[in-house]
Image: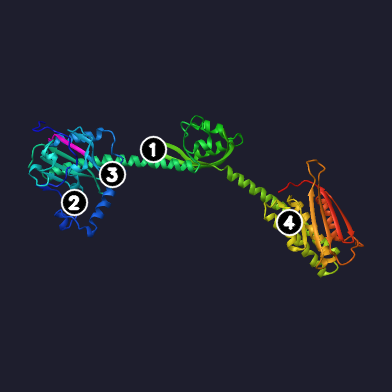
Amino acid sequence: MGQTAPVARLSGCQAFVGTNFMAQRPGKNRDAAASRGEGRNVADGGDRDADFNERRRLTTLRDYHILDTRPEPAFDRVTKLVADLFEVPIALISFVDDRRLWFKSAYGLDAPEKPRDISFCQQMIAGDQPLVVADAAEDARFRGNVLVTGDPYVRFYAGVPLRAHNGLILGSLCIIDTKPRAAFGPRELARLEDFAAIIMGEAELRRAAVERDEARQMLERALDFSCIASWQFDPRTDDLRWRGATAELWGADFETALSTGAGFFARVHPDDREAVRRILDESIDSGDPYATEYRINHPERGVRWISARGDWDVRANDAMLTGICVDITEQKSRQETANLLMRELHHRMRNLFATVSAIISLTRHSAGDVEDYVERINSRLDALNRAQNVLLGANFMTGSMHALMREVEAGFPRVRWAGPDLVLPENALVAMALLFNELATNAVKHGALSNDSGRVDVRWTQDEGDAEDRKFRLSWRESGGTGMVVAPDRTSFGTLLMERSVRNNLGGTIERHWEPTGLVVDIALPARWREA
């Protein structure tokens, strides 16, 4: 097409305000002031609303990720076709940024962008409608514009907005001629709008693809952070594909080592391999979901537990098993610990019931009457309760020597004690609790604790070194009694209980001495307990 004036670079989206034709958007209601192009008063919030809408428009534009992208044939074909159809030298696809007009496609121009402040686009965005300018040189608003008075000497201009999915104007599709045109009616404008719809359809595909990629990246990052690996298995080809935290769960070599089902089974622990294979084959044969737990030989982390779940994704005649897997080693460890504790608790309860049964039976034979029987039973059950309190405050299987002595001191306040804190197993803790209870109860009835001035000092040590014959040594010394302490004339059940606790349960020796100042008990045991 010939030109009567040189074609220069032009800012796109020329103001869609026409002198001889203006198209109204279907269904768009405007008040009289808006239809006359009048602005709103600042007091009405007009400037504030305009700023908000502009920020929202720019945010929407950036969501399309189209600014500053490379030329693309899909857009260039539209501008060439539009220029040929309307027989104009210039056709532009322009997107309006905050300070510039950027041309995604510019047929008839070489410039990639122009400053926004020399264009007519401000009025186009404010007017929110397409427009046609038949002769810009005759229009009072545009006749002094540098694009009219100088290159490219714009005379005719027609453009339609490029609307985003939310209705905001991102730019325009416009045609420009250096000669005025009188005939450009609704039919021609509708064709231009059809091309604008094609452009935005392409832009929407781009936006959808970007959102899809961002969503996939977000999902993959979420899988990484959550330590979940996703997988897809094709049973026909034995192909296996992975995403997510696969390297952490399966090893850094997963891309090569686990690209097939055969590679997957090679990494499954040999003891679990056949069971996993059987479950997978059953899922393939029946089409039912796949779910199992198994161990793997992780190349960097050793044996790990994996939980896997999957279901069938049917596409035409193809059926793919898609699922996820997570590392459950810690859960398995906690479960095993819980099972161990339950077994230990069951064992302890059996021992406790046996101890209580023996105490009840033997106390019956040594009690003088029912009241004495109840008192002795309650005292010994209190001793067992002290031991249980210490065990419950720890891990059910061991307890602290200091914690036990604090329980004893709470029941018998004038018992003083000192010695290293030791970790006692459950059977030793119960034996020591019964021992201290018998000694303290006897001191209350017959010894130093029978009056307000008496006291008991408990001291213990462990021999230094690590020799097998090392000893734990404990002394119980009563003082401040009111009378001469003498040996009993018969062996009571309490004495038998102490001796059984020390000799049979703890493998040690116990010696009692009736000194003028009070009872002295020396106990020696194998030093088997570690310090806390």
Residue type beneath disc 2 = Pro
Q: Which mark is residue 61?
A: 3
**Is 107 left or right of 254, judged from the image as shown?**
left
Residue sitting at x 13%, y 48%: 22
Disc 1 to disc 4, C-alpha distance: 72 Å
In contact (CB < 8 Å): disc 3 and disc 1: no
- Residue ID for mark 4: 404
Residue 203 belongs to the span the image colors magenta = no
- For disc 1, the neighbor class at 10 Å (few under 14, some 14 to 19, many from 20) is few
Look at discs 1 and 4 and give the one toward the viewer: 4
- Mark 2 vs 3, N-terminal side: 2
Q: Nearer the viewer, residue 78 or 296?
A: 78
- CA distance for labels 4 and 3: 73 Å
Between 266 and 338, the one lying in front of the other is 338
Residue 227 percent across, percent down from the top left: 50, 42
- Please tell me whether mark 3 sits on a helix, a strand or a loop: helix
- Front of the two marks 4 and 3: 4
Q: Quadrant of residue 179?
A: top left
State the mark number for residue 316.
Answer: 1
Tag 4: residue type? Leu
